Image: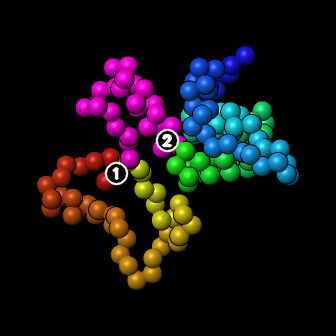
Amino acid sequence: MRRRHELTDPQWDFIQPLLPSHDAKTGRPPADPRLMLDGTLWVLRTGAPWRDLPERFGPWQTVYHHFNAWRKDGTFDKVLLALQVRLDRDGKLDWDLWCIDGSYVRAARCAAGASKKVPGRTPANPRTTRWAAAAAGSRASSTW
């Protein structure tokens, strides 16, 4: 039974040849690549931390290792390109509208562990005083 966020059999059949093979005959048996990809997709789709990955995908460290290796070796780029080619061939991809969102939200310095106060520097957002707001022609607000 296919669960939510997991690949269907036709999807897996399309992607499987694009994943690197593990031909090593020694050591621990390799992890199931489909399970590793399903675990990666679960994390990416839910936005959950790696440590919250459900146990059915195996150890989160193993799934993260595969994600990181596939990202570095260009596996995900090959999958994306193959999907683009297939969608374009089937007439389902409008190149005028297709894009990847590269935006991001910058966190405050303190979110990364930096000090909230910078000695010798004026605060980035000084408080507006009542007289400054009145001089600027602003109307009274609930914060006055």
Q: Position of residue 18 (x, y in %)?
A: 57, 37
Q: Which residue is mark 1?
A: 143
In this orientation, which residue lies closer to the viewer: 54 or 37? Answer: 37
Q: Which residue is mark 2?
A: 78
Tell me, what colour scheme is on the image? rainbow
Q: Amino acid at mark 2?
A: Lys
Secondary element at image label 1? loop
Residue name at image x 29 percent, y 26 percent: 94
What residue range appears in magenta? 76-102
Q: Amino acid at mark 1?
A: Thr
Residue name at image x 56 percent, y 52 percent: 73
Decide if residue 127 is on the left or right side of residue 79.
left
Q: Position of residue 111 (x, y in %)?
A: 53, 60
Decide if residue 98 is on the left or right side of residue 111.
left
Disc 2: CA contacts within 10 A as few (<14), some (14-19) or many (>=20):
some
Residue name at image x 68 percent, y 21 percent: 3
